[in-house]
Image: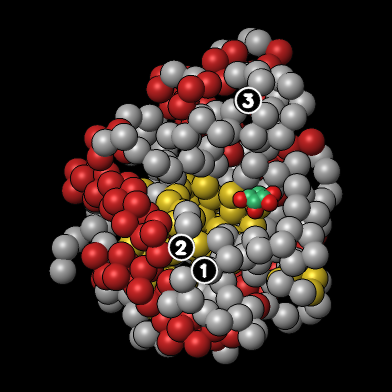
Amino acid sequence: MKKLFAGIICAAAITACGGAQKSSEAADSTVVATPAAAMLGRLAAVVADSAVVFGHHDDTAYGHDWSYEPGRSDVLETSGRYPGLMNWDLGLVELGDSVQLDGVPLAFIRSEVLAQHERGGINAISWHPRNPVSGGDSWDVSAAPVGEAVKPGTALNDTLRVWLGRAADFVCSLTDGSGRRIPVLFRPWHEHTGSWFWWGKEHCTPEEYKALWRLTREVFEARGVDNAVWVYSPDRLDSVGEYAERYPGDGYVDILGADAYHFGGTEGISDFNARARRQLDGAMALSARNGKLIALSETGSEGLPVSDWYSKVLAPLLAEYPVAYVCVWRNARHDVKPGHFYAPYKGHPAEADFRSFTENPRVLMAGEIKE
Ligand code: BMA
């Protein structure tokens, strides 16, 4: 089996945000892995077993026809198990809000991260911050703040640092019953090879984008975050080589992701495969140099018009690449955003196929990932 994972750095204890975290020096002076390093090791073991963790965004917050019903999950109801990974989004944390952009209270996310951790699952975090110049959302590209925001001494740089600090403090606040930090896969500034977000390709130079990433990691680490595994996630690429064009460097990234969606029904399959392969080939090429794990960090087919999408489209793609995890996007309530779902719900025609996909021993759900 190809060695995709090249060593885990055990960071020493650093100043913790929100109060002192226990030292990472054990009584016998052996250095204990940070939560992030332990999680990377766990994911490396998944890949070594030729397995893949299955994930779903906002899984226990709401589903096709419900919201905030304790214990409910469309994935649980269709597959019999919770997903191995749950993704959560921090959009609006930067303003100090207590509810994120899709209406999920941050306190709810905190408690669900713990619940998922306790059932042996993994958590991931994405972030759709507002545009700090226009005040619009992440998709508001009427102003291009990155160049100015990464320049030390500018007012925008001060704002960005405050915003990063708030996100860092939230990540730090994710702890278990003993006060130990829960590891999360943190995936900032995603899909930057497209131009739909204000940090996207047409709105900053490669150097400015890299500076944005580096500043993010530096602010997080200065605040003591030791539980974030950093995921880089380009979307569509013009060439395989473009994957690494805005890569901030091996010291800033832990996992090489790819966000690729299937658009349209059967007629969209070959386009999806071509795009996803180009991105995963880009991740593989970089991984061959630096030994980092790869992931399909966001994917899905909205509304699942191809009812055997999971076995016919996703599974063959996963079989070609040693991805540590795959995450599909949210199941919005049908009365809020009709047709916007990526995992089937009970009674949907894709249910049986999804169940059989999750029953593949190579696909890991919560409770099936080795500690
Ligand atoms: C998008 C859609 C939006 C949502 C956003 C952030 O892909 O699901 O409805 O607001 O992600 O979660």
* Cβ–Cβ under 8 Å for marks 1 and 2: yes
How far apart marks 2 and 3 lie (CA) works out to: 29 Å
Residue sticking out furthest to the front: 267
How far apart marks 1 and 2 lie (CA) works out to: 5 Å
Question: Secondary structure under badge 1?
Answer: loop
Question: Is 105 situated left or right of 122 in this image?
Answer: right
User: Disc 1 designates what residue?
Assistant: 305
Residue 32: in sight, yes or no? no
Question: Secondary structure under badge 2?
Answer: loop
Of circles 3 and 1, which is in front?
A: 1
The residue positioned 58% from the left and 33% from the top of the image is 197
Q: Is residue 129 above or below residue 357?
A: above
Judge by depth and name the residue closer to the eye, 15 or 68. 68
Question: Secondary structure under badge 3?
Answer: loop
Quadrant (top left, top right, bottom left, bottom right) of the N terminus: bottom left
Question: Is 183 situated left or right of 266 in this image?
Answer: right
Q: Amino acid at mark 3?
A: Val
Pointer 1 local density, CA inside 10 Å: few below 14, some 14–19, many at least 20: some
User: Disc 3 designates what residue?
Assistant: 141
* Cβ–Cβ under 8 Å for marks 3 and 1: no
Identify the mark nearer the N-term, 2 or 3. 3
